[in-house]
């Protein structure tokens, strides 16, 4: 009896063990595809995320490039408009500069030139050299005997560079001469008529280095009121380098 019962229990355990293994294998077989599919979905989700991020980055880069190009185009348009405005102003200035000093002096019919001096400058320079100062000193020695005079100071440049820059440069050159004469010889400002004519009135050809050097100049003319001084013979004060 006891032996039979023991054999039955062993048989039951064996069946239970087989059943348990079968159940585990079934569950494993059923869930494995689900786990694999879930992993595939995660991989696809991660790949889609990376693709979206990459697309967004490229879109942002494209937008930035488009904005940069648009800003550059706007700036170029503004620069072109400014350049056109500057060119028009320079052209108008050229007309006024060429006529203004001439009309002022011509309006003073009784003034005649009695002396002149010319000093030249290095390329893109507006600083007087010692030779320039010596020439101006020699010229200024005549001022003490002149009565009711004016000094016509005309600055010029060669043809190199933009017109507006040359106007400014020629004005700086004329200013340098005026400042030297006014400070050293105590000449009042009312005696000066100065103008920067840029490259508008060349005195030599700009096709040669020597010609361009002659155009980088300031000419000073001593104009005296002949009705106050009586008849005075015109004289030359020499020229600079």
Image (cartoon, rainbow, N blue to C red):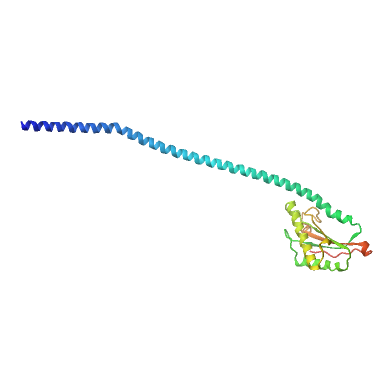
| Relative to 118, 161 lies left or right | left
Residue 87 appears anywhere in the view: yes
Point 76% across, 49% down: residue: 90
Foreground residue, 71 or 216?
71
Q: How many marks?
A: 0
Q: Position of residue 12 (x, y in %)?
A: 14, 31
Residue 232 appears in the figure? no
Q: Residue at x 64, y 43 (%)?
A: 74
Q: Position of residue 197 (x, y in %)?
A: 79, 54
The quadrant in which the N terminus is found is: top left
Q: Using the image, determine if residue 228 lies above or below residue 106.
A: below
The image quarter containing residue 172 is bottom right
Q: Residue at x 89, y 55 (%)?
A: 107
Question: Quick one: 211 or 184, which is closer to the camera?
Answer: 184
Outermost residue toward the left in this view: 1
Query: In what quadrant of the picture does the C terminus appear?
Result: bottom right
Left or right: residue 223 versus residue 158 is: right
Q: Nearer the viewer, residue 239 or 222?
A: 222
In the visual, does 138 lie left or right of 164?
right
Q: Is residue 234 left or right of residue 54?
A: right
Give coordinates of residue 62: x percent, y percent: 55, 40
In terms of image quadrants, where is residue 42? Answer: top left
């Amino acid at each position: 009896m006891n032996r039979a019962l023991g054999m039955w229990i062993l048989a039951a355990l064996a069946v239970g063990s087989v059943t348990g293994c079968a159940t585990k294998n079934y569950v494993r077989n059923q869930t494995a595809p689900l786990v694999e599919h879930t992993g595939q979905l995660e991989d696809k989700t991660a790949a889609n995320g990376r693709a979206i991020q990459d697309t967004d980055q490229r879109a942002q880069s494209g937008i930035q490039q488009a904005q940069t190009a648009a800003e550059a185009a706007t700036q170029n348009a503004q620069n072109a408009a400014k350049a056109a405005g500057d060119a028009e102003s320079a052209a108008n200035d050229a007309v006024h500069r060429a006529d203004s000093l001439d009309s002022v002096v011509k309006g003073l019919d009784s003034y005649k030139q009695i002396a002149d001096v010319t000093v030249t400058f290095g390329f893109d320079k507006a600083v007087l050299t010692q030779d320039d100062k010596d020439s101006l000193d020699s010229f200024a020695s005549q001022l003490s005997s002149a009565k009711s005079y004016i000094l016509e100071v005309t600055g010029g440049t060669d043809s190199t560079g933009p017109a507006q820059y040359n106007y400014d440069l020629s004005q700086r050159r004329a200013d340098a001469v005026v400042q030297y004469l006014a400070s050293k010889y105590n000449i009042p400002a009312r005696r000066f008529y100065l103008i920067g004519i840029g490259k508008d009135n060349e005195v030599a050809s700009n096709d040669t280095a020597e010609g361009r050097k002659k155009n980088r100049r300031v000419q000073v003319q001593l104009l005296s009121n002949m009705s106050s001084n009586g008849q005075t013979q015109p004289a030359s004060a020499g020229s600079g380098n």
